Image: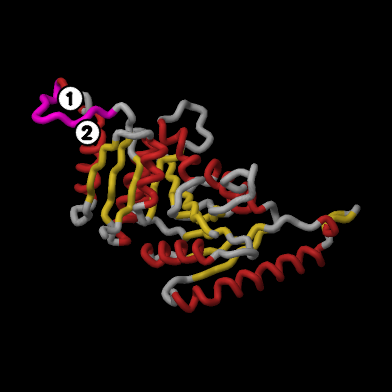
Amino acid sequence: MERVLTVGLDGSPASLAAARWAADEAERRNLTLRLLHAWPMLAPEPAATPAEVDQNYWAKRLVHTAQAELQSRHPGLSVVGDLVADDAQDALLHAASESEMLVLGSQGLAAVASYFLGDISLAVVARAERPAVLVRAERPEEEHRSLSGAPGDVVVALKLHGPCDDLLEFAFTTAAARGVPVRALHGRSMPLHAYTPWGVDHTVTQEERHEAHQGLRQVLRPWREKFPGVTVSDSVRLDSPAKAVVAATTGAQLLVVGRRRHHPPLTPRLGPVAQAAAHHAPCPVAVVPHD
């Protein structure tokens, strides 16, 4: 079966940035790039319809224009267009189940009205069965920097309790393909007993930091052995995990965060760290589902 990376396309600046990011990643991973445009009102395809009366003209043009641009940038990459007459969220979730990765444009907390991918990207990411990456629209200087291969690392946010192999597999595979380091990040809120009337008890902070570093090194040990060519560092921030993750992503190429496939009833599908990353992280954010 053909291995595919799917990107949702709607013509917005964010979705076009996502398509460019996805093309780079598909080429690194030797995957076929699938450009998916979904619209419930897509008309059945008639035979030999002139462009001036083709109800699907603009949808076709959107996909074909993006496909031509990406093919010119990546001549050796297999790029296919796919028009689907379906609700965008349903189509993207179905595509995610068939893909190695799903890439979506993200509006973050932009004040302007977003296109449909900006509206539904978080809902899709919260339900996708495969890793999903959110990519923001880039300012011209950011696009030039990303395309020129500027240095940076892959940051992976770790809790240190519960499974994290899926996150680390994704982070190390991505870093190895890009030839960049991995930075394992752990954010930890200070316990109440660390606070005293005269300030913070530095003995407690040192203990917390030492314990966290030990935990990170233990978790990372087998991955260092599995990916000997990837430089690895660990970072501990004594702050709320959500704040720590957002603060640590400046200059990163990618942030990798986790999402539980199975969550308690009446709780959000995306935890506070993933929510904060999706809304505030300046770099692309990969949300990796795990058990």
Which quadrant of the view contains residue 191?
A: bottom right
> Amino acid under label 1?
Asp
The residue lying toward the viewer, choosing from 201 and 192, is: 192
Give yes or no for residue 165 being in the magenta stretch.
no
The residue lying toward the viewer, choosing from 164 and 28, is: 164
> Amino acid under label 2?
Lys
Q: Give the range drawn in magenta.
A: 42-52
Q: Mark 2 points at which residue?
A: 60
Residue 181 x/y as whole percent: 46, 66
Q: Which residue lies furthest to the top in this view?
A: 53
Q: Left of 148 or right of it: where is 231? A: right
Q: Name the residue under label 1.
A: 54
In the rendered image, is residue 144 in sight?
no
- Depicted 9 relative to depicted 149: above or below: above
Q: Left of 52 or right of it: where is 270? A: right
Which quadrant does the C terminus fall into?
bottom right
Which quadrant of the view contains residue 9?
A: top left
